[in-house]
């Protein structure tokens, strides 16, 4: 079931999501390009600390998937300033099964596959939707809640 507009094919390589590590660029260059374009009110990124974009994420950052340009049916999420990934889990969150607040020493990334949710990190709440990538720094209290159903990937 191909979708020519989005490049989604539901294969094992992308599990139906528009995510590809091969297209990842250097952080500083991408941030300069994003800030120069200023295509949205949030300059295509929401960040708890604007300086953290350039130095690596100090608390958390949400990269809005709808604002990342697609090329050859791929989107490159720039996470080059982050540590190596050693954890991977596909999760489903519902109102009856919320992802309760937790805090730990590992960096985490959350990629939203389906549904809409609210992410809270150290008291700051942000709405997320399919295609968004949430970057979490170690020792930040974080949770994810939804009024419906959301499928997401946790890796870090």
Image (cartoon, rainbow, N blue to C red):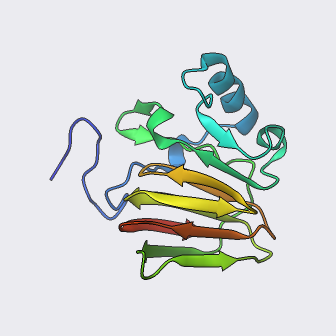
* Residue plotted at (40% across, 59% down): 113
Q: 56 above or below 34?
A: below
Quarter of the image with the C terminus is bottom right
**Foreground pick, 72 / 17:** 17
Quarter of the rendering containing residue 51: top right
**Foreground pick, 65 / 87:** 65
* Residue plotted at (52% across, 46% down): 22
Is residue 41 something that shows in the picture?
yes
Q: Residue furthest bottom?
A: 96
Q: How many marks?
A: 0
Q: Whole-percent x and y of residue 12? A: 32, 65
- Tell whether 49 sits left or right of 117: right
- Tell whether 122 sits left or right of 133: right
- Tell whether 49 sits left or right of 9: right
Q: Whole-percent x and y of residue 75? A: 46, 40
**Foreground pick, 80 / 125:** 125
Q: Residue furthest top?
A: 36
Is residue 68 something that shows in the picture?
no
Q: Whole-percent x and y of residue 125? A: 64, 55
* Residue plotted at (50% across, 52% down): 128
* Residue plotted at (78% across, 67% down): 140
Q: Residue furthest left?
A: 1
């Amino acid at each position: 079931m191909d979708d020519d507009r989005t490049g989604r094919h539901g294969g094992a390589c992308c599990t139906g999501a528009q995510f590809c590590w091969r297209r990842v660029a250097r952080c500083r260059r991408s941030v300069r390009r994003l800030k120069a374009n200023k295509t949205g009110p949030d300059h295509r990124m929401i960040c708890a600390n604007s300086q953290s974009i350039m130095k690596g994420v100090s608390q958390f950052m949400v990269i809005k998937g709808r604002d990342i340009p697609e090329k050859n049916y791929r989107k490159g999420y720039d996470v080059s300033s982050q540590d190596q990934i050693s954890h991977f889990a596909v999760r489903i969150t519902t109102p009856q099964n919320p992802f309760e607040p937790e805090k730990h020493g590992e960096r985490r990334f959350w990629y939203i596959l389906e549904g809409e949710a609210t992410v809270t990190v150290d008291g700051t709440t942000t709405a997320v939707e399919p295609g968004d990538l949430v970057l979490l720094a170690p020792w930040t209290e974080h949770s994810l809640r939804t009024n419906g159903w959301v499928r997401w990937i946790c890796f870090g």
